[in-house]
Amino acid sequence: MFVINCKNYEEIAGEEIIKFVKIAEKVSKKHNVKIAICPPQHLVGLVANSPIPIFAQHIDDSKVGSTTGYIVPELLKKSKVRGSLINHSEHRISSSEIQKLVSRLKDLKMISVVCVKDVAEVKKYSKLNPDYIAIEPPELIGSGKAVSKERPELIEKAAKTVESAKNNTKLLCGAGIVSGQDVAKAIELGSKGILVASGIVKAKDWSKIMSEFAKSMT
């Protein structure tokens, strides 16, 4: 799984997100790699009909109905959104909310990607059996220094911790990934995929960098 978090980067503002997703569709098909895109929340509707999975960047544990301004998973499902990041380091939430949201997504047959900062959180949240756990040390996010190079032991420990949970959760690796070499190293260390943002979105040639990452995964 190759998840691209677009955050609120200006590079994909407006209709640029459509161009970005179309490139991802082509790369996914050509290299037979599953790519999921997390657009800014207000742009989700522009690309929700894509054949590749579109995820929300965040969801709230709020009810359907009179909950102004909250992002409700049941309504995302009706808009063809396939899953969501939960607890990204830039939008942390409480452990009780994480538990409830993983459960809600499971009930909706939507994909959950729980973001964690260390191995202790991997151990804690893998027990909830989310689809994916993405480990991203906060100090390396957006740094251009890949976790697979800077802290390879972290990925190895996280992979073993996820395996020991003996459920269906898979590990993703994120933070500072900027090259195919970083991706290949993460896979070699036990990750089942990657969660990337600026390394793709801020690149000058989206097709070239997505293809480089996709090839490195296979």
Image (cartoon, helix red, strand yellow):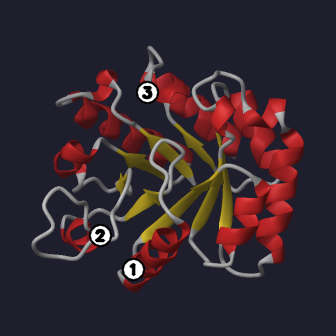
Secondary structure beneath disc 1? helix
Q: Label for residue 151?
A: none
Residue 161 in the image: above or below residue 149: below
Residue 121: where, in percent of width, then height? Answer: 70, 61
Residue 41: where, in percent of width, then height? Answer: 26, 47
State the residue position of label 1.
104
**Crowd class of label 3 (few under 14; some 14 to 19; many from 20; radius 10 Å):** many
The image quadrant of residue 212 is: top right
State the residue position of label 3.
201
Secondary structure beneath disc 3? helix
Q: At x 39% / y 36%, what residue is drawn? A: 6
Image side of residue 39 versus residue 124, left or right: left
**Crowd class of label 2 (few under 14; some 14 to 19; many from 20; radius 10 Å):** many
Tell me, yes or no, whether the two marked residues, 2 and 1, touch with CB atoms within 8 Å.
Answer: yes
Tell me, yes or no, whether the two marked residues, 2 and 3, touch with CB atoms within 8 Å.
Answer: no
The image quadrant of residue 110 is: bottom left
Report the Cα–Cα distance between label 2 and label 1.
8 Å
State the residue position of label 2.
73
Mark closest to the chain's N terminus, 2 or 3? 2
Q: At x 50% / y 34%, what residue is drawn? A: 197
Mark closest to the chain's N terminus, 1 or 3? 1
Mark closest to the chain's N terminus, 2 or 1? 2
Amino acid carrying mark 2 in the image:
Pro
The image quadrant of residue 66 is: bottom left
- Across the whole image, how many numbered discs are drawn on residues? 3
Secondary structure beneath disc 2? helix
Q: At x 84% / y 37%, what residue is drawn? A: 151
In which quadrant will I find the N terminus? Answer: bottom right
